[in-house]
């Protein structure tokens, strides 16, 4: 009985077998593999941005306003993807923009995941009126359109990247809380939890050491999908002028600054839009692969 909680920790050989099984099912989804490699390339590009970017993303060249990409008439190899309305290099701003997008995704997912797990664990483990109060609050938050609620929160807190991330994290938290609660309700009455309870494990140990590790699979998938959602919401807030503020090279802010040049300088709008589209698509494809690999119901025998 005393070793009941230890049985939940897989042996090294079992871990290797689990990783091999995970990779087997993950690579079956070709789109997920492509998305994973693109995401890895994006991370590398963000880390090496100062080395890869040909120009400073904030420095303006007043002699090169709205220069088209190099393959169009009037383009130059000095600015491969052209410049914006104040002469800043589009390629450099896109490369540095990857840093902001990844930073936004990591911060938002971390805050919402940690908060959602704690809230969901408390609600699912204790039940009763605690569960009812917490879930009704989550329902109220979910009743509002996420972007609208984030916009209201940013309007209250003040425009800026930090406040935008806080607002998006608050809006995303109920999804993790409900998912954690559902997983806890399915696990807390299982035999290994009962054995740990009889062995004298306290409530905190039962929640975080015994039950939580067995609830992580759906949370990992949700975190991946929320990562792409955070990038989209941050871009939308930046486009509305409530997120990152100029001259920050954030993709949504780049779109906002380029609105008036849509008809005569397509690259200043299209290229940041494509960066958002491809990044979100890659992360969503990777999330689909994680779901296939981690959900036993989707595994083929």
Image: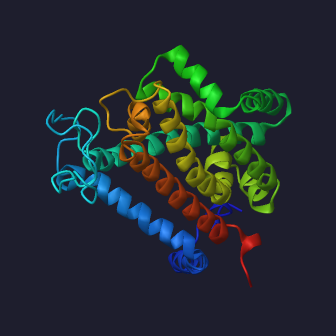
Front one among 49 and 271: 271
Q: Give left or right: position of 263 versus 292.
A: left
Residue at the right extreme?
Answer: 128
Residue at the bottom extreme?
Answer: 301
Q: Give left or right: position of 179 versus 16.
A: right
Q: Residue at x 57, y 38 (%)?
A: 112
Q: Residue at x 82, y 37 (%)?
A: 127
Residue 77: percent from left, percent from top: 17, 57
265, above or below 246, in the image: below
277, above or below 110, in the image: below
Q: Residue at x 55, y 78 (%)?
A: 27
Total numbered circles: 0
Question: Which image quadrant: the N terminus?
Answer: bottom right
146, above or below 82, in the image: above
284, above or below 255, in the image: below
Residue 298: percent from left, percent from top: 74, 72
Residue 240: percent from left, percent from top: 50, 27
Residue at the front extreme?
Answer: 73
Front one among 165 and 233: 233
Q: Residue at x 63, y 39 (%)?
A: 116
Q: Give left or right: position of 281 versus 129.
A: left
Residue 262: percent from left, percent from top: 43, 39
Q: Give left or right: position of 6 versus 101.
A: right
Residue 202 appears in the rendering: no
Question: Which image quadrant: the C terminus?
Answer: bottom right
Tell me which corner region of the image, top left, top right, bottom left or bottom right, holds residue 45.
bottom left
């Amino acid at each position: 009985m005393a070793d009941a909680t230890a049985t939940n920790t897989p042996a090294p050989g079992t871990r290797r077998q689990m990783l091999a099984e995970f990779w087997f099912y993950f690579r079956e989804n070709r789109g997920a593999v492509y998305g994973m490699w693109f995401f890895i390339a994006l991370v590398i590009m963000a880390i090496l941005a100062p080395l890869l970017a040909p120009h400073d993303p904030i420095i303006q060249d007043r002699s090169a306003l709205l220069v088209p990409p190099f393959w169009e008439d009037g383009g130059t190899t000095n600015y491969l993807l052209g410049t914006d309305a104040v002469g800043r290099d589009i390629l450099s701003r896109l490369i540095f923009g990857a840093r902001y997008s990844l930073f936004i995704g990591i911060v938002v997912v971390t805050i919402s995941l940690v908060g959602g797990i704690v809230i969901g664990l408390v609600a699912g483990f204790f039940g009763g009126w605690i569960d009812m109060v917490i879930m009704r609050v989550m329902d109220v938050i979910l009743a509002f359109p996420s972007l609208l609620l984030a916009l209201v929160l940013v309007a209250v807190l003040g425009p800026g990247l930090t406040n935008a991330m806080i607002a998006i994290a608050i809006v995303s938290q109920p999804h993790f809380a409900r998912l954690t609660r559902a997983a806890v309700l399915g696990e807390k009455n299982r035999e290994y939890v009962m054995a740990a309870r009889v062995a004298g494990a306290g409530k905190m140990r039962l929640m975080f050491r015994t039950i939580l590790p067995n609830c992580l699979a759906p949370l990992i998938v949700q975190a991946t999908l929320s990562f792409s959602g955070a990038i989209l919401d941050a871009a939308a807030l930046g486009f509305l002028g409530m997120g990152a503020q100029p001259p920050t090279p954030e993709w949504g802010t780049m779109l906002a600054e380029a609105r008036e040049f849509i008809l005569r300088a397509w690259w200043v709008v299209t290229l940041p839009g494509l960066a958002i589209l491809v990044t979100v698509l890659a992360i969503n494809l990777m999330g689909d692969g994680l779901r296939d690999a981690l959900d036993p119901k989707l595994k083929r025998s």
